[in-house]
Image (cartoon, rainbow, N blue to C red):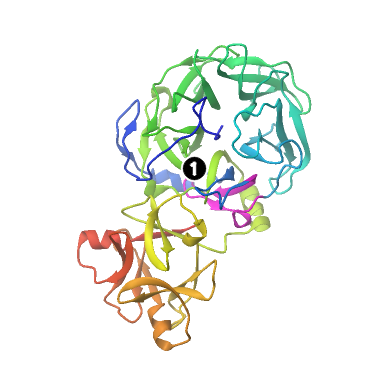
Amino acid sequence: MSAGPLPSRRLFLGMAAAVPLSTTGALTLGSRPASAATAAPSVMAYFTQSPRNLGTDYGLHLAVSTDTLQWMPLNQNNPVVTPTAGDGGLRDPFILPKQDGTYVVMATNLKGTDWTKKTPYIHVWDSPDLRSFDNYRLLKLHDMATHTWAPEAFWDASRGQYAIIYSAVNSSGHNVIMVNYTTDFQTVTAPQVFFDPGYDIIDGTLAKDVNGVNYLYYKGHNSLTGAKSTSLNPGSFTQFTSGLAPQGGIEGPILAEAAGTWYLWGDANALFYAYQTNDLSTGTWTATDRRLYTQPLNSKHADIKPIPQTVYDNMVAKWGKPAWNRLKSYNFPDRYWRQVDSLGRIDPYPFDPYTDSQWKLVPGLADPSGISFQSVTDPTRYLRHSYFQLRLDADDGTARFAQDATFHKTAGLADPSWSSFRSHNYPDRYIRHFNYALRIDPISTTTGRADATFSVWY
């Protein structure tokens, strides 16, 4: 439950990309496999949260990816549906591809962060194609005086039923993973304990039948921990890894596979971390280089599922691509372009106002073959250089302003798959960061080339 903790609920974490990790394996940075380009499309479901709650929304948000690493928000990062019953908001959404090719969406029935609320209900929708969400209902799972957090589901062929797993406090007095069974997500069997290692755990996620073994990852002791079983029966799982976490803790695990690589995602106060392995059986994970992945803006406690290409195409056609971009630093990939007091800089994600980091890349004001960076919140203002520092200023209509605000996109100076931006009227200078401030400088060193290289994504 991205709600945060087990009884001591909030997580506080520094934003730097290079944080010490506690893993069961080597502390190396994973690199994207060459085969990742052939990964099937995927969908991510999430709600949104930002540090000052300017971007917090408890509706169902969707993003898509062609490699399970770079995520494109749909519907301008607005919700595609919002609960109308229960608490009036959701957390921890989950998408289940059903046996008949349609989908069920489930979510925690909670709007906000009151972890003392007790409810036996979860939100449920049916969807034929992830473009419409029908038959909305609250589904009751138990009669216990407890919460019902982070529901997930899987098909149990041996039972001919779907299993719904979720976090709740039962007679043990601490959070365990519970399970109910259903065939229609309308009625369910009586709850049972699915997994209880003897201490407080929440946020269970399952990878089913990987070479005959089922893997369950969950949050316990503020880290992501794995259990496994050759059966899907309640009580059959045994813990087999120690905790995996950046400093400060992590929650909301997601297991997702892409082109032979398994990724374990985790959520640390709305900042996603990704780890990878080629063999789930080892329980060993390496941290994925943050250059390789970009979470949707303000995303919190997500779920990832593969989808057919036609579903991907139809979702993009319905919900649309973002009308804005964000720009990420190459050598500080936890930092994004933004303006603060009208000065351009790179700052660690996440931050508020988050809109300070959204830009429209429009035809250059002085040369339409170039580009200008237009503010999303105030379209009269553009990034321009003044005394070589980048500023966000209103267009005064002069030729000088147009030239100062025009840049030419080139292959990244440090990595040609990324981007660099050459000044229009000072063509020997490129946008780079220096002491985190954005400016234009001549580039002649390895450090300068890295400082002047950025990704353009969402």
Is residue 99 visible in the rendered image? The answer is yes
Left or right: where does residue 263 sit relative to residue 155?
left
Left or right: where does residue 135 sit relative to residue 70?
right
Q: What residue type is disc 1 on?
A: Ala
Please check the rendered image and state whether residue 70 is part of the magenta-colored stretch, yes or no.
yes
Is residue 208 visible in the rendered image? The answer is no
Find residue 140 and report its horizontal and vertical position in percent. Answer: 75, 25
Quarter containing the N terminus: top right
Left or right: where does residue 300 sit relative to residue 99?
left
Find residue 441 and report its horizontal and vertical position in percent. Answer: 26, 71
Please check the rendered image and state whether residue 370 is part of the magenta-colored stretch, yes or no.
no
Q: Residue furthest bottom?
A: 399
Q: Which residue corresponds to the image point at 72% horizontal and 23% vertical from the top-left?
A: 141
For label 1, the residue is 270
Left or right: where does residue 425 sit relative to residue 299?
left
The foreground one among 204 and 408 is: 204
Find residue 169 and report its horizontal and vertical position in percent. Answer: 60, 19
Q: In this rendering, is residue 20 above or below 358?
A: above
Which stretch is magenta? 58-79
Q: In this rendering, is residue 236 above or below 286?
A: above
Q: Give the quadrant of residue 321.
A: bottom right
Q: Which residue corresponds to the image point at 69% horizontal and 27% vertical from the top-left?
A: 119
Q: Secondary structure at mark 1?
A: loop
Q: In this rendering, is residue 228 above or below 16?
A: above
Q: Give the quadrant of residue 86.
A: top right
